[in-house]
Image: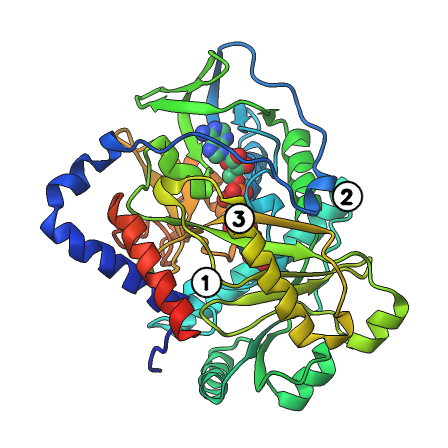
């Protein structure tokens, strides 16, 4: 299938723009991390979901020795801690989170529960049998989320009515039809929906068709954080919040320093810091941390719900490079996210003026899709950082001078489900059980090279401007 413009090709172009300049300035590229060390700062989570953030545990107040130290209290970190304790209950597992659990992408996202990995979503890899194995793995993980929700007694509002990628153009329709045909031959139960089927499912006739995955769904992300936090703690993991890790001293026993002036020593370390990982000096050349924007309406009246007509309530994203994604909550709110993402120099924090522009765009998009929502003001608006890898491929594995640092990242906007698949893999790797994961392409996958600043900024800005200009 020929590759047409997509976020994938945008990122590649952005990298090329950056790398092209690097060729002429290799010295600066090498020196860059010393000239511009990334600031270790964290913006508070202003999302609608944040209202459901679990109560915070006390910060780390004394030096500790553990078997494993996990950095980051999002889905990756919490699920790794849970699976490690489940697998090896004798191990002391300590998790450190800079603010509260769910302060990062896990508590700010677009709530779509998706199968596969982003690089293989609607695009088969070289061996479709591998895609099918990944599909089954991720679909089974959604069942695990449902079971854990029942075990912890925390309803994370998981709805498995499927998920759609709606198609904006006839080229997208053709590609989706070809993909669905090939994916079904490989055994995946995905479907192609025509224009009328889409219109009657989501209430807007603007789309030419859709790719439908019956095993996808929607969730309340912060309630899922609650589930993972409760599961990890009841399995015996110790969680410290408001504990910022400032640097890591690698060794046979890693030493993790915190802003609180205390440290944790542990043989194994898990980097579950997602888009913030480069701030600790790791994977700086693998991830472009881009800010995406999301907004939430108040609960709609019964009349508005009837007017828009979205009976199946399955979430959807569209097929543009500057994708938008929408979901419908249990209490009848609609959230819309996406549009043009932002990149701030040196993985910096957002700019409020830029945010305002994005929310205006999301409002216009919402009314374009659902004219009955004209005049509905958003109740909450927020941004979050996504860890894009160049080809949208994720990676899970081990690294470090002593090969005792474990990581999972590069989810590229596809992590609500995949993070805990990787949490389980991280636990297996830490326990020396690598064999089962060898057939999967994401194990220790090396991610495409992204140059340092200022080239990363230059590349990202050029790529983003190009797509804004061409409107693809
Ligand atoms: C706006 C937005 C929309 C999205 N929409 C979807 C979607 O609809 N579907 C989907 O599947 N995926 C989506 N994603 C992606 C998904 O949310 C992420 O892939 C996933 O949440 C990543 O989880 P994580 O645990 O790896 O990272 P995070 O949730 O970001 O957790 C990392 C944690 O590490 C902590 N941390 C970082 N550095 C340090 C440090 N130095 N010391 C201590 N703690 C530290 C942070 O505070 C943070 O809590 C979206 C993401 C965003 C931002």
Asked where in the image residue 112 lies, by quadrant, the reply is bottom right
Query: Which quadrant of the rendered structure holds the C terminus?
Result: bottom left
Q: Earlier in the sequence, mark 1 or mark 2?
A: 1
The reply to whether discs 3 and 2 touch (Cβ–Cβ < 8 Å) is no
Depth order, front residue of 168/414: 168
Q: How is the image coloured?
A: rainbow
Image location of residue 160, percent across then percent down: 70, 64
Classify 10 Å Cα crowding around label 1: few (below 14), some (14-19), many (20 and above): many
| 250, above or below 159, in the image | above
Residue found 50% across the figure and 82% down from its top: 180
Separation of marks 3 and 1 at Cα, in angstroms? 30 Å
Residue 187 lies, with reference to residue 76, above or below; the image says: below
Q: Taking 16 as reference, is 208 above or below it?
A: below
Q: Nearer the viewer, residue 244 or 13?
A: 13
Q: Nearer the viewer, mark 3 or mark 2?
A: 3
Q: Is mark 1 within 8 Å of ligand 1?
A: no
Choose mark 1 or mark 2, whichever is in front: 1
The quarter in which the N terminus is drawn is bottom left
Left or right, 405 with reference to 227: left
- Mark 2 crowdedness (10 Å alpha carbons): few <14, some 14-19, many ≥20: some
> In the rendered image, which residue does mark 2 sit on?
154
Residue 140 placement: quadrant: bottom right
Residue at coordinates 47% horizontally, 31% vertically from top-left? 41
Image position of 229 with respect to 200: above or below: above
Q: CA distance from mark 1 to mark 2?
A: 28 Å
Residue 118, disc: 1
Q: CA distance from mark 3 to mark 2?
A: 37 Å
Per the image, label 1 sits on a secondary structure element best described as helix
| Mark 3 crowdedness (10 Å alpha carbons): few <14, some 14-19, many ≥20 | few
Q: Which mark is residue 353?
A: 3
Q: Position of residue 247 (x, y in %)?
A: 37, 23
Q: Tell which circle, 3 or 2, labels the residue nearer the N-terminal end.
A: 2
């Amino acid at each position: 299938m020929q590759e047409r413009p997509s976020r994938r090709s945008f990122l590649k172009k952005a990298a090329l723009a950056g790398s092209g300049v690097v060729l002429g300035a290799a010295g600066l590229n090498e020196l860059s991390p010393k000239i511009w060390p990334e600031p270790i700062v964290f913006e508070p989570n202003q999302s609608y979901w944040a209202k459901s953030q679990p109560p915070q545990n006390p910060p780390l107040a004394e030096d500790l020795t553990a078997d494993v130290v996990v950095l980051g209290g999002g889905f990756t970190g919490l699920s790794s801690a849970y699976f490690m304790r489940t697998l090896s209950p004798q191990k002391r597992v300590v998790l450190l989170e800079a603010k509260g659990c769910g302060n990062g992408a896990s508590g700010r996202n677009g709530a779509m529960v998706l199968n596969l990995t982003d690089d293989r979503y609607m695009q088969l890899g070289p061996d479709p049998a591998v895609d099918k194995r990944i599909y089954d793995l991720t679909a089974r993980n959604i069942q695990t989320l449902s079971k854990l929700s029942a075990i912890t007694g925390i309803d994370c509002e998981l709805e498995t009515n499927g998920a759609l990628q709606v198609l904006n153009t006839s080229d997208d329709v053709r590609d989706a039809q070809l993909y669905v045909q090939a994916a079904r031959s490989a055994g995946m139960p995905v479907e192609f929906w025509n224009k009328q089927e889409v219109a009657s499912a989501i209430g807007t006739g603007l789309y030419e068709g859709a790719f439908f995955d019956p095993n996808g769904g929607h969730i309340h992300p912060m309630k899922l954080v609650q589930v993972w936090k409760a599961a990890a703690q009841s399995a015996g993991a110790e969680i410290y919040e408001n504990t910022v890790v400032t640097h890591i001293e690698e060794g046979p026993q890693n030493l993790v320093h915190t802003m609180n002036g205390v440290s944790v020593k542990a043989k194994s370390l898990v980097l579950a810091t997602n888009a913030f990982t480069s701030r600790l000096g790791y994977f700086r050349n693998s991830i472009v941390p881009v800010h995406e924007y999301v907004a939430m309406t108040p609960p709609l009246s019964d009349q508005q719900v009837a007017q828009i007509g979205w009976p199946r309530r399955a979430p959807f994203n569209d097929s543009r490079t500057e994708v938008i994604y929408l979901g419908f909550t249990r209490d009848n709110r609609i959230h819309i996210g996406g549009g043009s993402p932002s990149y701030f120099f040196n993985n910096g924090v957002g700019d409020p003026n830029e945010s305002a522009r994005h929310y205006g765009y999301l409002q216009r998009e919402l009314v374009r899709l659902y004219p009955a929502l004209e005049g509905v003001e958003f109740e909450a608006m927020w941004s979050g950082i996504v860890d894009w890898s160049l080809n949208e491929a994720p990676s899970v594995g081990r690294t470090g001078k002593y090969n005792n640092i474990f990581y999972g990242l590069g989810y590229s906007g596809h992590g609500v489900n995949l993070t805990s698949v990787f949490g389980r893999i991280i636990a297996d790797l830490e326990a020396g059980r690598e064999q089962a994961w060898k057939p999967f392409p994401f194990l220790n996958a090396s991610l495409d090279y992204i140059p340092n600043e200022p080239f990363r900024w230059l590349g990202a800005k050029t790529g983003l401007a190009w797509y804004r200009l061409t409107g693809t």
